[in-house]
Amino acid sequence: MAKDKARYFTFLLYPESIPTDWQNRLELLGVPIAVSPLHNMDLSSVKGQKYKKAHYHVIYVAKNPVTADSVRYKIKCALGEKSVAMVQIVVRSMENMYLYLT
């Protein structure tokens, strides 16, 4: 069964799971990437937890249609095995996704 391919993806990065030079390493991938400011005040829906764990939202724009697994592999190679878990295809508006980041 063929996996879905796309050019626009999003994922989260957690500060404790990425190297200190993570921004430079992402730049070396050679594709357009947008990174949000640190989200450290998002309210949690988990009982007893006021805020979600601090994280960055990232948009990744591939040169050609690729799978989410391919993007995950490239990010893990660049930032380390524990850097990213879930990579999702942007299925709605890329403009809205970017506005949410900024």
Image: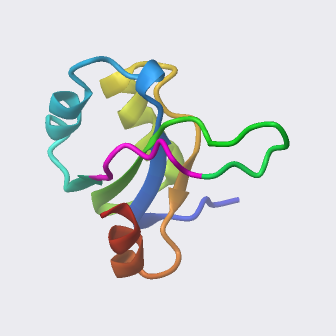
Q: Is residue 34 left or right of residue 70?
A: left
Instruction: Using the image as rendered, state which of residue 91 and residue 44 is in the foreground.
Output: 44
Instruction: Using the image as rendered, state which of residue 101 and residue 51 is in the foreground.
Output: 51
Residue that appears at 40% across and 68% down: 100
**Colour style of the rendered protein structure:** rainbow
Q: Is residue 2 left or right of residue 60?
A: right
Query: Measured from the top left, where is residue 76 in percent x and y?
Result: 42, 27
Residue 39 drawn in magenta: yes
Q: Is residue 7 above or below residue 66?
A: below
Query: Measured from the top left, where is residue 72 in percent x and y?
Result: 47, 39
**Does residue 21 appear anywhere in the picture?**
yes
User: Residue 85, located in which quarter of the rendered image?
Assistant: top right
Marker count (numbered): 0
The residue stretch that appears in magenta: 35-42
Residue that appears at 44% across and 67% down: 6
Magenta stretch, main secondary structure, is loop
Quadrant that contains the N terminus: bottom right
Instruction: Using the image as rendered, state which of residue 41 and residue 86 is in the foreground.
Output: 41
Q: Is residue 21 above or below residue 64?
A: above
**Does residue 70 appear anywhere in the picture?**
no
Residue that appears at 34% across and 73% down: 99
Q: Is residue 73 left or right of residue 25?
A: right
Quadrant that contains the C terminus: bottom left
Residue 86 drawn in magenta: no
Query: Measured from the top left, where is residue 47 in percent x and y?
Result: 85, 43
Residue that appears at 45% across and 56% down: 10
Q: Is residue 79 above or below residue 28?
A: above
Instruction: Using the image as rendered, state which of residue 21 and residue 2 is in the foreground.
Output: 21
In this view, which residue lies farthest toward the right?
47
